[in-house]
Amino acid sequence: MSRGERLARTYWFDLLIVLLAIVAMLEVVLGRGSSGAPTTTLWFCLPALAILVLPVFARRWFPFAGLAAFWLLAVGISFVDPLLIPYPESVFLLRLRDRVQAVVLAYESGLVTPGA
Protein backbone atom coordinates (compact mmCIF):
# COMPACT_ATOMS: atom_id res chain seq x y z
CA MET A 1 0.00 0.00 0.00
CA SER A 2 1.49 3.33 -1.01
CA ARG A 3 1.72 6.32 1.28
CA GLY A 4 -0.96 8.17 -0.71
CA GLU A 5 -3.41 5.28 -0.34
CA ARG A 6 -2.71 5.08 3.38
CA LEU A 7 -3.31 8.82 3.82
CA ALA A 8 -6.50 8.62 1.76
CA ARG A 9 -7.83 5.76 3.89
CA THR A 10 -6.95 7.57 7.11
CA TYR A 11 -8.15 11.03 6.16
CA TRP A 12 -10.95 10.33 3.67
CA PHE A 13 -13.51 12.03 5.92
CA ASP A 14 -11.33 15.14 6.16
CA LEU A 15 -10.98 15.17 2.38
CA LEU A 16 -14.76 14.95 2.11
CA ILE A 17 -15.08 17.96 4.42
CA VAL A 18 -12.65 19.96 2.26
CA LEU A 19 -14.58 19.00 -0.87
CA LEU A 20 -17.88 20.05 0.71
CA ALA A 21 -16.40 23.37 1.80
CA ILE A 22 -15.19 24.07 -1.73
CA VAL A 23 -18.60 23.13 -3.12
CA ALA A 24 -20.27 25.47 -0.61
CA MET A 25 -18.01 28.32 -1.71
CA LEU A 26 -18.78 27.62 -5.35
CA GLU A 27 -22.50 27.59 -4.59
CA VAL A 28 -22.23 31.02 -3.00
CA VAL A 29 -20.15 32.46 -5.86
CA LEU A 30 -22.28 31.01 -8.67
CA GLY A 31 -25.56 31.72 -6.91
CA ARG A 32 -25.00 35.46 -6.46
CA GLY A 33 -28.15 37.42 -7.19
CA SER A 34 -30.52 34.45 -7.02
CA SER A 35 -33.37 34.32 -4.56
CA GLY A 36 -32.26 33.27 -1.10
CA ALA A 37 -28.60 34.03 -1.82
CA PRO A 38 -26.46 35.72 0.85
CA THR A 39 -26.60 39.50 0.76
CA THR A 40 -23.11 40.31 2.05
CA THR A 41 -20.04 40.61 -0.14
CA LEU A 42 -17.95 37.69 -1.24
CA TRP A 43 -15.10 39.18 0.81
CA PHE A 44 -17.10 38.17 3.89
CA CYS A 45 -18.88 35.03 2.65
CA LEU A 46 -15.92 33.00 1.41
CA PRO A 47 -13.60 33.49 4.42
CA ALA A 48 -16.57 32.96 6.75
CA LEU A 49 -17.30 29.58 5.16
CA ALA A 50 -13.61 28.62 5.33
CA ILE A 51 -13.40 29.59 9.01
CA LEU A 52 -16.67 27.77 9.71
CA VAL A 53 -15.20 24.48 8.49
CA LEU A 54 -11.89 24.68 10.38
CA PRO A 55 -13.21 23.51 13.80
CA VAL A 56 -14.59 20.34 12.21
CA PHE A 57 -10.98 19.21 11.63
CA ALA A 58 -10.35 19.49 15.38
CA ARG A 59 -12.89 16.73 16.08
CA ARG A 60 -10.11 14.12 16.33
CA TRP A 61 -8.42 15.89 19.24
CA PHE A 62 -11.42 17.69 20.76
CA PRO A 63 -14.54 15.67 19.86
CA PHE A 64 -17.03 17.92 21.61
CA ALA A 65 -15.26 21.28 21.38
CA GLY A 66 -14.60 21.05 17.64
CA LEU A 67 -18.22 20.46 16.73
CA ALA A 68 -19.47 22.92 19.35
CA ALA A 69 -17.19 25.57 17.85
CA PHE A 70 -18.72 24.82 14.43
CA TRP A 71 -22.18 25.57 15.79
CA LEU A 72 -21.07 28.68 17.68
CA LEU A 73 -19.37 30.06 14.58
CA ALA A 74 -22.48 29.32 12.53
CA VAL A 75 -24.58 31.29 15.00
CA GLY A 76 -22.12 34.20 14.93
CA ILE A 77 -22.01 34.24 11.12
CA SER A 78 -25.80 34.13 10.92
CA PHE A 79 -25.97 37.35 12.94
CA VAL A 80 -23.99 39.10 10.20
CA ASP A 81 -25.75 37.43 7.25
CA PRO A 82 -28.71 35.21 8.12
CA LEU A 83 -28.78 33.72 4.61
CA LEU A 84 -25.18 32.53 4.42
CA ILE A 85 -25.45 29.42 6.59
CA PRO A 86 -28.65 27.90 5.13
CA TYR A 87 -27.89 28.82 1.48
CA PRO A 88 -25.16 26.32 0.52
CA GLU A 89 -26.70 22.88 0.77
CA SER A 90 -23.30 21.22 1.14
CA VAL A 91 -22.81 22.90 4.55
CA PHE A 92 -25.70 20.81 5.87
CA LEU A 93 -23.75 17.66 5.05
CA LEU A 94 -21.12 18.75 7.58
CA ARG A 95 -23.67 18.10 10.31
CA LEU A 96 -23.21 14.34 10.04
CA ARG A 97 -23.30 12.97 13.57
CA ASP A 98 -20.86 10.14 13.14
CA ARG A 99 -18.81 8.15 10.69
CA VAL A 100 -21.65 5.69 10.11
CA GLN A 101 -23.74 8.44 8.52
CA ALA A 102 -20.74 9.52 6.46
CA VAL A 103 -20.18 5.97 5.22
CA VAL A 104 -23.84 5.57 4.31
CA LEU A 105 -23.71 8.89 2.45
CA ALA A 106 -20.55 7.82 0.61
CA TYR A 107 -22.16 4.55 -0.51
CA GLU A 108 -25.42 6.20 -1.55
CA SER A 109 -23.68 8.90 -3.56
CA GLY A 110 -21.42 6.39 -5.31
CA LEU A 111 -18.17 7.77 -3.89
CA VAL A 112 -17.37 4.34 -2.44
CA THR A 113 -18.20 0.99 -3.97
CA PRO A 114 -18.64 -2.15 -1.86
CA GLY A 115 -15.62 -4.42 -1.88
CA ALA A 116 -13.29 -1.80 -3.36
Image (cartoon, rainbow, N blue to C red):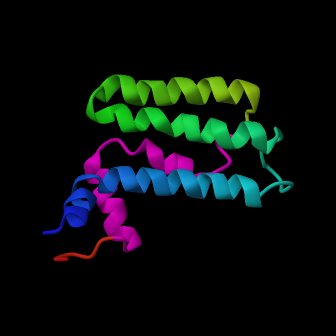
Q: Seen in the image, is 104 located left or right of residue 30?
A: left
The location of residue 21, given as percent across then percent down, is: 54, 50
- Is residue 25 visible in the rendered structure shown here? yes
**Magenta-colored span:** 83-111
Q: Residue at x 76, y 40 (%)?
A: 43
The location of residue 38, given as percent across then percent down, is: 78, 43
Q: Seen in the image, is 93 located left or right of residue 45?
A: left
- Residue 63 against residue 33 in the figure, above or below: above
Q: Residue at x 50, y 39 (%)?
A: 53
Q: Is most of the magenta stretch helix, strand or loop? A: helix
Q: Residue at x 82, y 40 (%)?
A: 41
Whether residue 82 appears in magenta in the rendering, the answer is: no
- Residue 42 against residue 90 in the figure, above or below: above
Q: Residue at x 60, y 53 (%)?
A: 24
The location of residue 106, given as percent across then percent down, is: 34, 64
In what quadrant of the picture does the N terminus appear?
bottom left
Residue 79 lies in quadrant: top right
Q: Seen in the image, is 87 located left or right of residue 12?
A: right
Q: Nearer the viewer, residue 17 or 93?
A: 17
Residue at the outermost front position: 3
